[in-house]
Image (cartoon, rainbow, N blue to C red):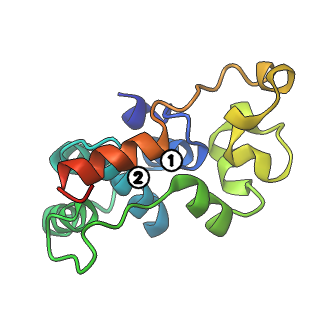
Amino acid sequence: AAWRDGRTGYPVVDAAMRQLRHEGWMHNRGRLLVASFLTKTLYVDWRVGARHFLELLVDGDVANNQLNWQWAAGTGTDTRPHRVLNPTTQARRFDPDGAYVRRWVPELAGLAGRSVHEPWRLARAARAAYDAYPDPIVDLSEGLDRFRRARGRD
């Protein structure tokens, strides 16, 4: 539910999911990132994400959607099925100034610079000003460990 609602605590993931809900569309990088987060970090079956996308996408195509979700989950024809995208690294690389996050996650709009990508790292007093935004629902390293164990790669 947190993933669907854009309340994971990872701003770039949440921005993409909120854009999907509002516009029925998101950029390919967002699609890759939210699919990796759901299927590899949270280790949720790819069909959950595929179903949700088809409900909301204005450009949804069953074959394209299903195959892309399988690929992102590493269950389709992926040459790197164990690749896990780190949302913080992806945010810094593809939204370096945080404009995308600030547009779709307005409760973080007041954060300057790259701090918008990791609000949980703010000092306690500063973080209190943004308490309407949730803390991460999963630690990325714990999610990665769970994924590797489940895939027999620990």
Residue 11 horizontal/vertical position (percent): 60, 43
Q: Amino acid at mark 2?
A: Val
The disc label shown at residue 34, or none: 2
The residue where tag 1 is placed is: 13
- Residue name at image x 80 percent, y 22 percent: 124
Quadrant where the N terminus is found in the figure: top left
User: Which is more toward the observer, 75 or 107?
Assistant: 75
Looking at the rendering, which quadrant does residue 33 occupy? Answer: bottom left
- Residue name at image x 24 percent, y 59 percent: 153
SS type, badge 1? helix
User: Which is more toward the observer, 76 or 108?
Assistant: 76
Quadrant where the C terminus is found in the figure: bottom left
Residue 63 horizontal/vertical position (percent): 13, 67
Looking at the rendering, which quadrant does residue 64 occupy? Answer: bottom left
State whether residue 39 appears in this view: no
Q: Is residue 151 above or below residue 8?
A: below
User: Which is more toward the observer, 102 or 148?
Assistant: 148
SS type, badge 2? helix
Residue 91 horizontal/vertical position (percent): 62, 58
**Label 1: few (<14), some (14–19) or many (≥20) C-alpha neighbours in 10 Å:** many
Residue 4 horizontal/vertical position (percent): 37, 36
Residue 56 as seen in the image, left or right of residue 119: left
Q: Earlier in the sequence, mark 1 or mark 2?
A: 1
Q: Amino acid at mark 1?
A: Val
Looking at the rendering, which quadrant does residue 78 occupy? Answer: bottom left
**Label 2: few (<14), some (14–19) or many (≥20) C-alpha neighbours in 10 Å:** many
Residue 9 as seen in the image, left or right of residue 78: right
